[in-house]
Every structure is written in C-alpha cells, then in structure tokens.
C-alpha cells in the first residue's frame, strides 16, 4: 500500500484569505488541524489574467498583490504545497512573446513558441486538421503578425494563451526554469496543467499520443530530481487515466465526481462499482476543482471510436441534464455556448448545487470521496458547501466563475458553523487520523448500497452508503476520538 497523505485543500489565495499569508492564517486559524496540504492555485504574475492565472505573464514570479516567494515558502514549511506547472502555454502578454511579435524570427525567443508550420512544415490536409483534438470549438490556430510576417500561431485554449514549442531547446529551457522556481519556492507536488495537449505531432490527434507519454515521463523525472512529486491533469477516457497512472506519481480521479452524481441521481451503484474495481490507487480524488464537472472522463472515447465509457452516451446526457435541473437551470447559463471559456467536456456548477443543495446527498458523496484510495483534495467552495455565484457570473460572463466565489473572512467563519460543513469537517478529521486508512481497502455492495472498508491490524473503518435513500453510516473501531 502506498504511503497515505492527509486531506488537502484547493484554493485561490485571493478568493480564500485574500493573499498567501491570509490563506496561511486560515489554515492555522479556523481550519487548524483540518488539512495536511494545499494546492495553491496560480499565484503567478498576474493571478487575474484572461484565465484566472493559467495564462502567466511571468510564471516564475509571485504576483506582489498576493505576497512573495517568502510567503509561499512559509506556507510550504507548514503544509505540503502543490502548485501548477502550466506546461502548454504562456500569456500573449509575456515579455518573450511580445518580443517575438515585434521581431519575429530574429527574436532570441522565437523558438519558444509554436506555429502551424513547426508541426506541418509541408502543410496539412483537411483530414489532418480535422483530427486535432481540442477542448474548444474550432481549430487551434490564431493568425498573428510576427515581425511583419503573418503566421498561424498555435493556441490550444484561447488567443491569449500561446502554446510552447516543447520540441525546441528554448521551450524546454523555459519549463526547466519554471520548475526550478517552484521547487526553490518550497513546492513539493507539481501539477502538470494541460499536459495532454503539450506535444503536437503531425498525423495524430496531438493529444495524449505516445510522444506525450514520453514527454510526461521525462518531465516527471526532472521534477523528481528536484524533490517534487508529479500530478498529471488530463480529462480523457478512463483507460488513459489508468495507463498514465503507471508512469507518474499521481493522476486525478476525474471519473469519480460525475459517477457519484450519476449514482445519486439514479440510485444505482453499478457504474461506480465498476470504476472502483479498476481505478488507480495513486490518485488525487476530487469532487470539484477550479474547473467544471468533467463528463468526458466517464463517456465513450472522444478520439478512438468504439471504446465505450463508464457511462453510455444516453447516461452522460441524462447526467448533464440532471445537473441543469437540480441547479435550477443555473449551470445551463454557465456552460457551453452560454458563457465564455467554452469547454466541450465540462459542466460549470458547484458540486453542492449539482446535488440540489441536499445536505445528505452532498455528505454521502464526500464520504465516498474520503474513503476511496488516494489523496483527497477538497476545493475551497466545496469545503463550505458553496452555492453558485450567479452575481460573479453576470459580472464576468466567464462560466467557471459560477464556482469561484470570493469569500470574505466573515463569510468563511459563518459557513464553517453550518451543520453540513461541520459534519464534513468531522469526516475529514476521521480520514486524516484513523489508522485503518494506512491499511488495505476493499469495496463491495449491490443494488443501491455500496460498502467501502479499510483495515490495518485491529483498526477498521467502514462506510456503508445507500444512494437511493441518501443515507450512510460510518463505523470506526477503535475510534480515534469518535464520530
């Protein structure tokens, strides 16, 4: 059995604490003893760009509005610290790309950025271009003038996020410099953001190809040399998650969130049980993150036809409609064509609202998350059983902002006193403290009842959950303080 890690928080410093030091004050104050670590969402310059920090102008600098590297290191001394290595792209406003815009091929940074001709030097036909996998509608190119020459710049996500040429020494040197800055700053877990898109290869989908796997392996080795574990962030068919798990330290269990919603909507544990039998144990478990609720992770393969998913297409459709219905239509306003930051594979909604604000269903889902093997991470909005922020969505028009509320200290302290949050914190403390979670895991159940059990010597902790009645019972013997 792998070494256990305690429960971790996922949070933006500006939205949960106001700064890096403010977040540390929360973790040491009202949340003392709750979390073992924290995934500190992008705190680089700027943290509030076109994609909430995932489009860094300077990936090696802490935005001074949030603090300094000294503040980050102070956080890392107290908690296991995860940060994002944004592998695929940088901001169009970065100094390097602005120099390429002005000077073109004579810029010393010209090799750092990817154009269509870098991948297709002899051009590409319709089939090749149509075969490129992209999470947004349209082709991944933006026409730009670089040093007076019109070029097709590769922009997988948005025209503000310029893809790196990771086959070029300049692109490789850039990533090595960012990795050094992170690990020197105390980061011991590195999340490879958007790494599935990072390697482009003519004649392929340019998503999770064999060359991508090789690249991930090489980058993981470099991170380990600097003392950091690697978490790979990929939304894709569940079999790819299983495959990549064997090559890296951690993968996300992105199938668990939609499967739990499906299970609670239908009262049937069959799909969940199947996943529990095959899922990798070296996972980071989440129900919610700064992104939307993924559905591609449980559906049929979007790249290779004929590979069924954990759910059939009609079940995926019912799942999406179920989220829209239970959120009173709010998620529909924040998803797909209704909002900017369009993704073809995610529904934007808080997890609490995806369950209709039902405390019992929500706590059951969290209990399952905390009982399956892996490192549990709880998003700051989910920690407080947060509702959809329709006001923020209206102000920004960005779909994901529905689940990115800016909390005041008063709101945090008020919500921590809500019964649903207090019960969630009890479950987190049990997961952190009970010695049974250092032992062996097994899953059982049928119909609407799932049973998850951990045993280590005389220590035992079990969860019996009935998804039809939305009730569950936790038994822990000997209990480390009771529940």
Image (tube, rainbow, N blue to C red):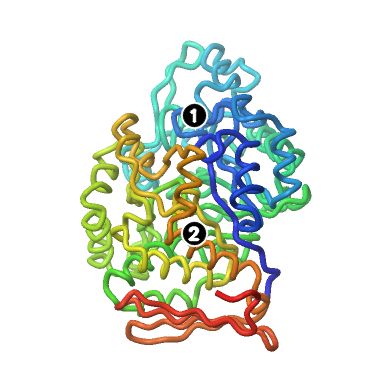
Q: Decide which of 297, 474 is in the foreground and name it.
A: 474
Classify 10 Å Cα crowding around label 1: few (below 14), some (14-19), many (20 and above): some
Where residue 430 sits in the image (x, y, percent)?
Answer: 59, 70
In the picture provided, is 219 more to the left or to the right than 405? right
Few, some or many C-alpha atoms within 10 Å of disc 2 (few <14, some 14-19, many ≥20)? many
State whether residue 346 appears in this view.
yes
Find residue 52 and report its horizontal and vertical position in percent. Answer: 47, 34
Q: Are marks 1 and 2 in contact (CB under 8 Å)?
A: no
Report the side of 369 relative to 397 (left or right). Answer: right
Residue sitting at x 32%, y 54%: 353
Task: Please indicate, yes or no, whether residue 340 appears anywhere in the rendered image.
Answer: no
The residue to which callout 2 is attached is: 286
Q: Quadrant of residue 64?
A: top right
Q: CA distance from mark 1 to mark 2?
A: 24 Å
| Residue sitting at x 70%, y 43% | 75
Residue that badge 1 annotates: 48
Image position, residue 305 (x, y; %): 33, 63
> Which residue: 57% across, 52% down?
9
Q: Which image quadrant for residue 22?
A: top right
Residue 341 drawn above or below residue 270:
above
| Dot 2: element | loop
Q: Please tell me whether residue 37 is drawn above or below residue 175 in the rendered image.
A: below
In the displayed structure, 9 sits above or below 151; it is below
Question: Looking at the figure, which quarter contains the N terminus?
Answer: bottom right
Quadrant in which the C terminus appears: bottom right
In the foreground, 130 or 315: 315
């Amino acid at each position: 059995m792998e070494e256990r890690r305690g429960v971790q928080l996922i949070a933006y410093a500006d939205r949960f604490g106001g700064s890096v030091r403010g977040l540390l004050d929360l973790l040491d104050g009202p949340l003392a003893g709750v979390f073992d670590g924290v995934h500190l969402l992008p705190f680089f310059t700027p943290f509030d760009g076109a994609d909430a920090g995932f489009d860094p102008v300077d990936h090696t600098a802490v935005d001074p509005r949030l603090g300094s590297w000294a503040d980050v290191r102070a956080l890392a001394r107290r908690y296991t610290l995860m940060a994002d290595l944004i592998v695929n792209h940088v901001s169009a406003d970065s100094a390097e790309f602005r120099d390429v815009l002005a000077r073109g091929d004579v810029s010393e940074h010209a090799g750092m950025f990817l154009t269509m001709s870098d991948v297709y030097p002899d051009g590409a036909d319709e089939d090749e271009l149509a075969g490129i996998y992209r999470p947004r509608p349209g082709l991944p190119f933006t026409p730009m003038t670089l040093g007076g020459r019109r070029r097709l710049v590769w922009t997988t996500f948005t025209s503000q996020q310029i893809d790196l040429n990771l086959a070029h020494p300049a692109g490789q040197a850039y990533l090595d410099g960012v990795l050094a800055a992170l690990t020197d700053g105390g980061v011991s877990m590195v999340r490879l953001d958007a790494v599935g898109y990072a390697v482009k290869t003519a004649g392929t989908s340019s998503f999770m190809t064999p060359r991508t796997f090789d690249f991930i392996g090489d980058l993981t080795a470099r991170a380990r040399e600097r003392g950091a574990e690697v978490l790979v962030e990929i939304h894709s068919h569940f079999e790819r998650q299983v495959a990549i798990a064997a090559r890296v330290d951690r993968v996300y269990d992105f199938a668990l969130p939609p499967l739990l919603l499906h299970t609670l909507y239908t009262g049937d544990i069959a799909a969940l049980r199947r996943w529990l039998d095959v899922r990798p144990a070296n996972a980071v478990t989440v129900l919610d993150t700064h992104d939307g609720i993924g559905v591609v992770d449980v559906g049929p393969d979007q790249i290779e036809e004929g590979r069924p998913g954990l759910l059939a297409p009609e079940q995926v459709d019912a799942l999406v409609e179920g989220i829209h219905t239970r959120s009173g239509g709010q998620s529909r306003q924040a998803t797909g064509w209704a909002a900017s930051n369009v993704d073809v594979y995610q529904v934007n909604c808080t997890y609490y609202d995806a369950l209709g604000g039902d405390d019992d269903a929500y706590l059951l889902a969290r209990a399952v998350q905390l009982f399956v093997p892996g490192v549990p991470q709880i998003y700051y909005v989910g920690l407080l059983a947060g509702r959809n922020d329709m006001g923020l969505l209206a102000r920004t028009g960005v779909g994901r902002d529905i689940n990115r509320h800016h909390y005041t200290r008063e709101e945090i302290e008020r919500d921590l006193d809500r019964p649903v949050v207090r019960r969630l914190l009890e479950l987190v403390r049990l997961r952190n403290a009970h010695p049974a979670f250092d032992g062996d895991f097994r899953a059982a159940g049928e119909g609407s009842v799932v049973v998850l059990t951990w045993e280590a010597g005389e220590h035992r902790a079990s969860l019996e959950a009935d998804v039809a009645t939305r009730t569950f019972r936790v038994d822990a013997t000997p209990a480390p303080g009771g529940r």
